[in-house]
Image (tube, rainbow, N blue to C red):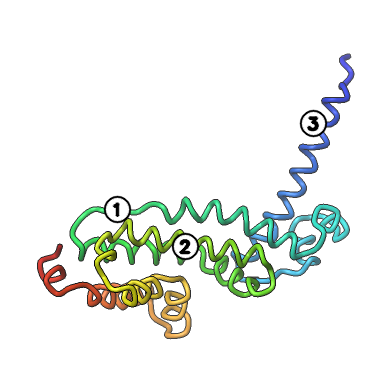
Amino acid sequence: MIEPTATDTLVGLHELYTGIRQTIIDALESMIEEGNLIPSAQQTSERAGVDIETVFLYFSDMEHLFSIADTQRRIQLESLFAGGDRSGSLAQRIQQLVDYRGSCYGVVSNIARASLAQRWRLKVLYENYARHQQALKIDAFDWLPELASLPKPLQDSIEAQLSFEHWDRLRDHQNLAEGEAKAAIAATLSLSFPLSGRALGQ
């Protein structure tokens, strides 16, 4: 019988540590996705199937756990928002952009709400959210290069129109259906571009 070496033992312990740590992170994220925007340590431990002491063995506090989970999510979100059909006329691309963003926001709505709820007190969440907003701004120019020809105030307004905060207001506060929210945003964006471009479908 081959006895495990010290290296084998260390590798096994590392895998166990990593596995439990990720289980705790996944438990937190699953509750957020379900609508519990700020899960407690007790709720997280119960979902993960570990005792609360184990949670704080792997994370110094809940802020640390939220920060690590948010950083992992940002990597996934960047790839999610990078897709979509970006071909066609200006009018077509506006609609395709709004449709795609709206669908993405539907997937991450509770994640975004959780970030907004805590970004004021967690520096990592604040920085990650700001980084994601900048990435979305650049992405909008990739969808709509015509944005570069508009005055900056209009560019800023369109950025706000395409934001999660605006989408969430239409869907939650104004109680619009998904299709109605998309139509409202697309109509406003279309009016921001020169009439000639919109009329010709360019």
Give SS at disc 2: helix
Q: Which residue is mark 1?
A: 85
Residue 141 at what x, y percent from top left?
33, 60
Which tag is nearer the camera, tag 2 or tag 3? 2
Task: Please tell me whether mark 3 sits on a helix, a strand or a loop.
Answer: helix
- Please give the label number shown on residue 134: 2
Crowdedness near tag 1: few (<14), some (14–19) or many (≥20) residues, C-alpha within 10 Å:
few
Counting residues from the start of the chain, the first of labels 1 and 3 encountered is 3
Q: Residue at position x 11%, y 71% from top?
A: 196
Could you classify mark 2 by the number of other residues whose Cα lies within 10 Å: few (under 14), some (14-19), or many (20 or more)?
few
Q: Is residue 147 left or right of residue 49?
A: left
Q: CA distance from mark 2 to mark 3?
A: 39 Å
Q: Is residue 193 above or below residue 60?
A: below
| Disc 1/disc 3 C-alpha distance (Å) | 44 Å
Residue at (34% x, 54% y) in the render: 84
Image vertical order of residue 163 relative to residue 55, above or below: below
Name the image quarter holding residue 144.
Answer: bottom left
Q: Earlier in the sequence, mark 2 or mark 1?
A: 1
* Disc assigned to residue 128: none
Residue placed under numbered mark 3 in the picture? 11
Sequence-wise, the earlier of marks 2 and 3 is 3
- Amino acid beneath label 2: Gln
